Amino acid sequence: MVHTETTFEVQELTELLKVMSDPTRILIAYFLQSKTYCVCEFVEMFEISQPAISQHIRKLKQIELITETRKGQWRYFTINKQSPYYSMVQQILKTINPENTKVKNVITKEKPLEC
């Protein structure tokens, strides 16, 4: 990647915007700002299949926006504050209204970690 802290190549910016154009990926990044989550938690919260969540996670990992930690068979994810895109994504995520119906619906399905 060729960029400074605030500038990106057009292709890099295009790739970031493609990844962040999906509502589920935006919300995954939004929730990962505040804590670490396991794939199984996202499956419950978003009410979609584990393979679907894994595909969203894979795309976020490809742009290095999230990091993965393995503990046994489980994978845990957190936001990558070292990502070159972190500050730009933070600006986007700050515009999300926590009272938004979709945000509230997803967060109400969060359960204590049982992985």
Image (cartoon, rainbow, N blue to C red):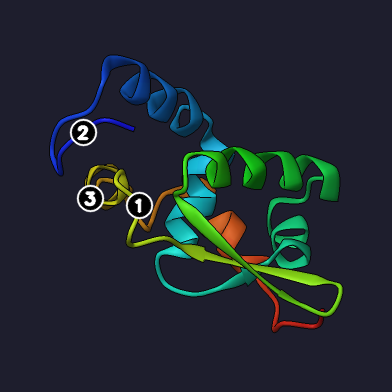
Q: Is residue 49 left or right of residue 102?
A: right
Give the x, y percent position of residue 38: 69, 69
Name the front one of labels 3 and 1: 1
Q: Which SS class for mark 2?
A: loop
Give the x, y percent position of residue 16: 40, 30
- Can residue 103 be seen here? The reply is no
Going from N to C along the chain, the mark reached first, 2 or 3, is 2
Look at 40% across and 65% down and name the residue there. 33
Q: Is residue 38 left or right of residue 92?
A: right
Look at 47% across and 39% down and name the residue there. 63
For residue 2, above or below residue 73:
above
Give the x, y percent position of residue 30: 43, 55
**Type of the residue with mark 3:** Ser
User: What residue is pinned by disc 3?
Assistant: 87
Q: Of 26 and 105, which appears nearest the observer? A: 26
Q: Quadrant of the N terminus?
A: top left
Q: Residues within 10 Å of mark 3 (few under 14, many from 20)?
A: some
Look at 38% across and 56% down and name the residue there. 99
**Residue 67 numbered mark, or none:** none
Q: Which SS class for mark 1?
A: loop
User: What residue is pinned by disc 1?
Assistant: 83
User: What residue is pinned by disc 2?
Assistant: 3
